[in-house]
Image (spheres, rainbow, N blue to C red):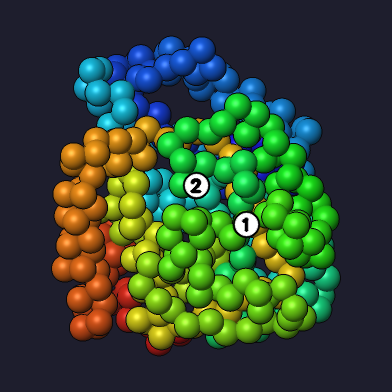
Amino acid sequence: MLENQCTTWPMPLVATVHVPVSGSKVLGSTGKTAATLDALKGQLAAFSARMQKEGECQLQLALFTEEQAADNPDAVYPINALRNRGIQMAVTEARQIVGSLVILLLDIDFIVSEELTADLATAAGWEALMRRLQAGTAVALPAFETPYDVTGAWRLQSGAVEGGTAVAFQAAAGGKRAAVDLFHNGSLLVFKEKESDFMFGPTQYRRWMVTDDFYPISFKLGHEPFILMARALTPWYDERFTGYGCNKSPLLGCIFHWGGSFAVHPRGFVVHVPHERSPSFFAFRGDVEGRARRERELWEFYDQEVTKPLEAGRFLPVTSFPERCSAEEQQPRREEL
């Protein structure tokens, strides 16, 4: 999945890799994963060197290990801590313009439309984006998936990865016109629409298909668009959320409740590349009897620890970077937004 991004994103790319270990042994090793930490470091170094040579991106790859019990290789992983370290590492400007440091918060299993990168390479496209970002707007990118995808299913069908990957790359290479055509003939779908429309529905996909300009959208609880954001105005992710479920929502809620806004890019979009479900998905939803309880507990925690504090104006994300989450440090950022 990282190789997919490296071959389609011609700008700086930060990736964080989490490896559970017991001593020098890598837990959960497969035929494609080295059994020892030193061997895995060698694999990652070789991959990074190959991507720098063959890929489009300027890759920054960081490895983070976590000591775990040897009999628990699929423990819930610290996804938001990894995301925060990615934000911390994002210091390279794609264009050498003062104050232009922009980050795209995107999951590893998506690729970006080539039309967006081409648009950002033009002065007009970059300036139109920067006017909004510097005003505290988060610019959302419509997200699509293919009918081959895993959404709504527990396991992929045979050939789904190959078929879905081909369609995803076709859409990304063809730009907005190709994406619209593929959507109308059923080859592209709104991401997760079958599973949870509220997560991406507020993006207003049919409006996007016919517009030539940015348009504002309202923030709604549970809406989780992938966004371009001025790095200086980007909140930290809340690291209490690990593994699967609700992990993006606190950051997006912070943007809104701290005075930011949301708009949709008129040409850019992202496409999900099919893959098998992660261990965290099965840990969260695999046990049918415990699923309802876990989901209820997660939403109760979110309501008590995120929603109510945000609405009361007293929420700060819990992170391992205290210099960025104290009230004194956060207040100037609120004023900028």
- Can residue 112 be seen? no
The residue carrying mark 2 is 151
Alpha-carbon neighbours of circle 1 within 10 Å: few (<14), some, or many (≥20)? many
Disc 1 from disc 2: Cα separation: 10 Å
Tell me what residue is drawn at x 29 percent, y 17 percent.
23
Q: Quadrant of residue 94?
A: bottom right
Instruction: Reply above or below: 103 against 329.
Output: above
* SS label for mark 2: loop
Among the two numbered marks 1 and 2 on one chain, the one whose residue lies closer to the N terminus: 2
Alpha-carbon neighbours of circle 2 within 10 Å: few (<14), some, or many (≥20)? some
Question: In which quadrant of the rendered image does the C terminus lie?
Answer: bottom left
Tell me what residue is drawn at x 44 percent, y 79 percent.
219
Question: In which quadrant of the rendered image does the N terminus lie?
Answer: top right
Instruction: Reply above or below: 24 against 61.
Output: above
* SS label for mark 1: strand
The residue carrying mark 1 is 189
Relative side of 71 to 323, left or right: left
Tell me what residue is drawn at x 77 percent, y 75 percent.
125
Q: Nearer the viewer, residue 191 or 248?
A: 191
Residue 75 x/y as whole percent: 28, 32
Relative side of 86 to 214, left or right: left
Instruction: Reply above or below: 44 against 230.
Output: above
Residue 301 x/y as whole percent: 18, 60
Question: Residue extending furthest front?
Answer: 185
Residue 216 x/y as whole percent: 57, 84
- The amino acid type, in three-letter code, at marker 1 is Leu
User: Marks 1 and 2: CB-CB under 8 Å?
Assistant: yes
- Can residue 174 be seen? yes
- The amino acid type, in three-letter code, at marker 2 is Thr
Instruction: Reply above or below: 315 against 11.
Output: below
Number of the label disc, if any, that sits on residue 171: none
